[in-house]
Amino acid sequence: MSPPITGFDSLAMAVDAVPYAKLLGIQSREENGQPLFFLPFQTHNIGNTILPALHGGVIGGFLETAAVLHVMWASEAQSVPKIVDFSIDYLRTGRPVELYAQCEIIRQGKRVANVLMTAWQEERSKPVAVARAHFLLA
């Protein structure tokens, strides 16, 4: 069961509240009671046309935005949380296919949330990137 959301009635409303999420084309759905974020492939997200490979900034931006959306979904926040720090490890080349992300809030206090993010493509067991972030809650 999804936790109650005070500021946003649904995950879709949270996505609409973050302009960058709409710019990237981030979509979401609930899977096993948790948000699953996905980024449909778009040719303008390619960074290396020779391989081809997704741009690292697109992958990083996707993970950061997914974490923001996850925190908005999971907390009773009335506004978009602010990023304090973000660290990403790129593990594999992001191929030109759909990219998925799932987030886990490791610790959430009254003012700060610590979130882990994982991005993968066809197999969840083969992540493309993992990231960690802290967010200041309003």
Image (cartoon, grey):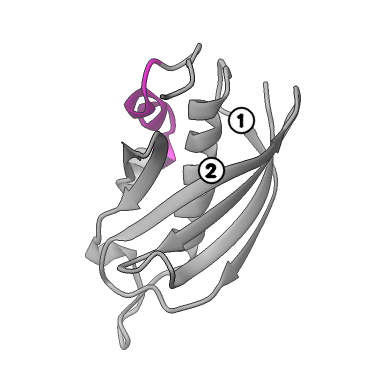
Q: Residue at x 56, y 63 (%)?
A: 130
Whether residue 25 appears in magenta in the rendering, the answer is no
Q: Residue at x 25, y 55 (%)?
A: 40
Quadrant into which the N terminus falls: top left
Whether residue 19 appears in magenta in the rendering, the answer is yes
Quadrant into which the C terminus falls: top right
Q: Residue furthest bottom?
A: 50
Q: Is the residue under label 1 in contact with that under label 2 (CB below 8 Å)?
A: no
Q: Is residue 55 left or right of 84 when viewed as pictured?
A: left
The residue indicated by pointer 1 is: 81
> Is residue 89 placed above or below 105 in the rendered structure?
below
> Is residue 10 placed above or below 92 in the rendered structure?
above
**Residue 40's disc number:** none
- Secondary structure of the residue carrying tag 2 is helix
Q: Nearer the viewer, mark 2 or mark 1?
A: 2
What's the residue type where badge 1 is placed?
Pro
User: Which image quarter: residue 109?
Assistant: top right
Badge 2, how many Cα within 10 Å: few under 14, some, many 20+?
A: many
User: Which image quarter: residue 14?
Assistant: top left
x then y, percent, for residue 59 = 45, 61
Q: Residue furthest top?
A: 6
By secondary structure, the bulk of the magenta-drawn segment is best described as helix
Depth check, front residue: 98 or 51: 98
Q: Is residue 119 left or right of 105 when viewed as pictured?
A: left
Magenta region? 9-20
Q: Residue at x 36, y 21 (%)?
A: 10
x then y, percent, for residue 37 = 37, 46
**Residue 67's disc number:** 2
x then y, percent, for residue 79 = 56, 20
